[in-house]
């Protein structure tokens, strides 16, 4: 085999590359004659680097290797001679003229450094590029320099360097930075504004460069081109700007739709012409709004009609256009009920920004983007006839649905001027109530919740009575299955401070007890026919931070479910009976307190297919094999909570609702109101006196409502030596208030027992003896302070 080296100049100045061509003896193109070699015969004397001289080696001559420990067997005469050991890769690389040219270059220019790295990588010696990478990455390049450097290399070449297994870790972040800088530089508003001004340059080459730069910028070029259209002094450039917008293609459509929200009719006229030329179906609904709007000029209306003709081949009549707008708004609003679109904000929707005087992108999740279109269409439909209750109702419903979801269901809505809250509130309480009822009836729960929250601030007491014998909208909302809507309506009614009974007031009392009854800990209800297996599941739930209750039949499970507001999910074994699993699910769904709870069905393997089919047809339900370990239980719970979707209420929210409800109950107990009978909440309040975060309010409340069980509970707390002293003294004070207002409701035996407890503690615990003495003073003086001796 014969070889020759071909030296060729590379792209970078001063760099050379080598390629080795091997030619076998049977080469069909014939053997190479040394005399025909254009480079002349090989001559060691012509070696550019000179003969290797061990004495000249900077590291000294190589030492002879030590003798082997064992003597090799003698070589037979017919054995082939052993092959020479190949030179190490680094030594072979250093002998390559192209590699040496790169390594000996003293250029510090970023382009030369990156080109050198690329050459070494292409030659298969990326490990030699480390010093060059350090020189390159240590340079403090500004954004313009990074963009210029990226422009000198193809994106494919840069990506290969970033993905190189040897170079990637060190060079990858630098190349990522180059790409980001290039993108930012290409889309820089200042530069694009300069290029847009060059569109009128007398030099044809300058105009061509400007057009090329604007086209490369994509949707970022829309703003400077729209600025051209908005400037009446640049009329001569308008046609060229519109042609460029059309050449940008569909990328220009979303920013242009944002421009249609501008108040500038002349600008919107030109944008409508561009949208017509682009023939985008996404522009139909916004153009319908412009076409119908009474605020549109004749020129704008004609341009919108012509654009609709270009896009759809038909210019709709006003009646047809109105129906299309209504349909679009309702369809998008209906889609917002699908919780699958809730997620991270990744979708751009462009809107007109009055402060910046340009169209800007806002990011939404899928639901938010859908609602942004709904709000735009509903508003356009509304302004055609602002006096129409139907149009106003649809507009405000879409507006509040979007705003409530955007703020976060567990966060307060912004209330500043110009927000959805302020806009809706400006229509007055009757209109907001109408929106709440409409949203509630059509299952737009976030919008209904937002409306109830607004009514809590602007509502008037007549909202509770104008329905006559039928419950008002707020009273109905206070009985809704959705916990957040129910709480918002209850809060609104508490803020209205009713002094007269009204239809549905009992729902409010029940709601106050429901919210106050939260223990502040997440709970799981387990319905399993085998108590031992249910106990195992409870243990797995405890490892995840849940308190768990186990029921061995359907009736017990239902009774537990409606008693606690803290259940986050229910697990039902398919073999549960009295009633069976399907009937138990129906009972849970019928009761507003449990209607939204996610339910997980546990099934044995031989019954899993049937149970999965049943769960698939049920709402917020899923089927599983029984979890056997912490990991499986975590997966089970996570999947079920995901099923809960928007109805899932966090522990922090439940705690806040419980504290608010207790505050309202205490206020009601201290007031002279006769609307809410708080005595029916006694069973809910009694356990709370032992709950640290609610004990103070619960003790105070029991002292006001005056029941026999309330006095017994206060007496029991005062007698308990394991409870904090402050709580025991508070119980004595509450007992005194209860006796003063309602008399002694304890039995004779209970009073005698109290004397026995006092006497048995004599000489033991001084603090307890003091509390027990105060109890007897309270009983003997009928709640009044003992006379001073």
Image: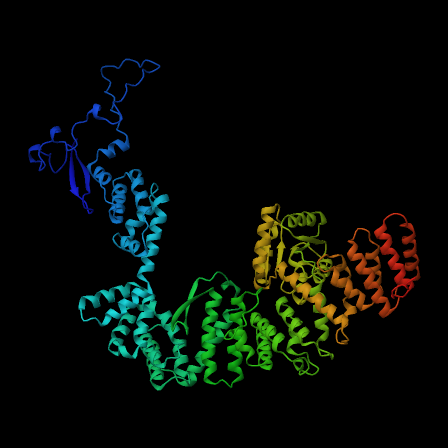
- Judge by depth and name the residue closer to the eye, 620 or 145: 145
Percent across and percent down for residue 92 are 24, 32
* Left or right of 765, for residue 605: left
- Please, is residue 583 above or below residue 323 in the view? above
- Judge by depth and name the residue closer to the eye, 562 or 193: 193
Query: Within the image, what quadrant is residue 467 found in?
Result: bottom right
Query: Within the image, what quadrant is residue 578 found in?
Result: bottom right
- Judge by depth and name the residue closer to the eye, 431 or 314: 431
Q: Is residue 670 visible?
A: yes
- Image quarter of the C terminus: bottom right
Percent across and percent down for residue 677 are 77, 72
- Please, is residue 456 above or below residue 763 in the view? below
Percent across and percent down for residue 703 are 80, 65
Percent across and percent down for residue 447 are 56, 72
- Judge by depth and name the residue closer to the eye, 768 or 574: 768
* Left or right of 204, for residue 269: right
| Rendered residue at 45%/75% (across/down) | 376
């Amino acid at each position: 085999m014969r070889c020759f080296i071909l030296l060729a100049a590379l792209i970078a100045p001063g760099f050379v590359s080598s390629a080795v061509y091997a030619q076998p003896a049977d080469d069909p193109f014939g053997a190479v004659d040394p005399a025909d070699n254009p480079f002349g015969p090989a001559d060691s004397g012509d070696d550019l680097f000179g003969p290797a001289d061990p004495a000249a080696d900077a590291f000294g001559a190589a030492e002879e290797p030590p003798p082997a420990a064992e003597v090799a067997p003698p070589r037979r005469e017919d054995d082939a001679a052993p092959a020479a050991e190949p030179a190490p890769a680094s030594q072979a690389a250093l002998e390559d003229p192209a590699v040496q040219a790169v390594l000996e270059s003293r250029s510090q220019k970023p382009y030369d450094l990156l080109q050198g790295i690329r050459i070494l990588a292409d030659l298969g010696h990326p490990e030699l590029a480390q010093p060059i990478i350090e020189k390159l990455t240590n340079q403090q390049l500004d954004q313009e320099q990074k963009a210029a450097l990226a422009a000198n290399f193809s994106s494919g070449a840069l990506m290969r360097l970033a993905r190189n297994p040897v170079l990637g870790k060190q060079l990858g972040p630098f190349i990522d930075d180059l790409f980001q800088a290039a993108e930012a530089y290409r889309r820089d508003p200042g530069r694009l504004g300069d290029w847009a001004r060059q569109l009128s340059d007398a030099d044809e080459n300058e105009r061509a460069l400007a057009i090329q730069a604007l086209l490369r910028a994509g949707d970022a070029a829309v703003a400077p081109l729209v600025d051209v259209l908005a400037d009446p002094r640049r009329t001569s450039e308008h046609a060229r700007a519109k042609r460029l917008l059309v050449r940008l293609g569909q990328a220009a459509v979303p920013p242009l739709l944002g421009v249609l929200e501008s108040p500038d009719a002349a600008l919107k006229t030109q944008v409508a012409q561009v949208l017509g030329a682009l023939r985008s179906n996404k522009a139909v609904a916004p153009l319908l709004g412009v076409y119908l709007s009474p605020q549109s000029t004749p020129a704008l209306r004609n341009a919108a009609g012509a654009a609709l003709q270009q896009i759809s081949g038909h210019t709709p009549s006003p009646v047809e256009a109105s129906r299309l707008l209504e349909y679009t708004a309702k369809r998008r609003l209906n889609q917002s009920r699908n919780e699958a679109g809730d997620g991270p904000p990744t979708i751009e929707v462009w809107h007109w920004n009055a402060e910046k005087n340009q169209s800007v992108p806002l990011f939404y999740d899928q639901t938010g983007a859908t609602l942004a279109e709904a709000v735009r269409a509903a508003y356009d439909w509304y302004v055609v006839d602002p006096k129409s209750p139907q149009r106003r109702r649809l507009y405000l419903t879409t507006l509040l649905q979007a705003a409530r979801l955007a703020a976060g269901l567990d966060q307060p809505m912004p209330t500043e001027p110009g927000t959805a809250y302020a806009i809706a509130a400006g229509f007055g309480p009757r209109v907001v109530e109408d929106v709440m009822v409409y949203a509630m009836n059509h299952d737009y729960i976030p919008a209904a919740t937002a409306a109830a929250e607004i009514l809590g601030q602007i509502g008037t007491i007549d909202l509770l009575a104008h329905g006559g014998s039928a419950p008002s909208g707020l009273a109905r909302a206070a009985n809704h299955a959705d916990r957040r809507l129910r709480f918002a309506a209850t809060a609104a009614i508490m803020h209205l401070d009713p002094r007269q009974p009204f239809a549905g007031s009992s729902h409010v009392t029940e709601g106050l007890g429901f919210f106050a009854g939260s223990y502040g800990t997440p709970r799981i209800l387990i319905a399993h026919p085998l108590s031992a297996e249910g106990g195992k599941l409870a243990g797995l739930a405890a490892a995840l931070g849940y308190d768990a209750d186990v029921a061995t039949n359907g009736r017990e499970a239902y009774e537990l479910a409606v008693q606690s507001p803290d259940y986050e999910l229910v697990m039902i074994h398919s073999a549960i009976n009295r009633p069976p699993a399907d009937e138990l699910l129906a009972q849970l769904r019928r009761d507003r307190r449990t209607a939204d709870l996610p339910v997980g069905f546990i099934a044995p393997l031989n019954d899993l297919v049937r149970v999965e089919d049943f769960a698939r047809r049920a709402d917020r339900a899923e089927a599983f094999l029984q979890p056997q370990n912490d990991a499986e239980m975590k997966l089970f719970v996570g999947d079920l909570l995901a099923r809960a979707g928007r109805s899932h209420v966090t522990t922090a929210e439940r705690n806040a609702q419980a504290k608010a409800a207790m505050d309202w109950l205490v206020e009601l107990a201290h007031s002279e109101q006769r609307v809410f009978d708080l005595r029916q909440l006694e069973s809910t309040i009694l356990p709370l006196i032992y709950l640290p975060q609610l004990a103070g309010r619960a003790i105070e409340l029991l002292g006001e409502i005056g029941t026999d069980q309330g006095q017994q509970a206060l007496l029991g707390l005062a007698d308990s030596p394991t409870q904090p002293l402050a709580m025991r003294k508070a119980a004595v004070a509450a007992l005194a208030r209860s006796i003063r207002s309602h008399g002694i409701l304890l039995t004779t035996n209970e009073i005698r027992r109290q004397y026995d407890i006092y006497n048995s503690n004599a000489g033991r615990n001084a603090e307890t003896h003091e509390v027990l003495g105060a109890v007897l003073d309270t009983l003997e003086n009928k709640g009044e302070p003992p006379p001073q001796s």
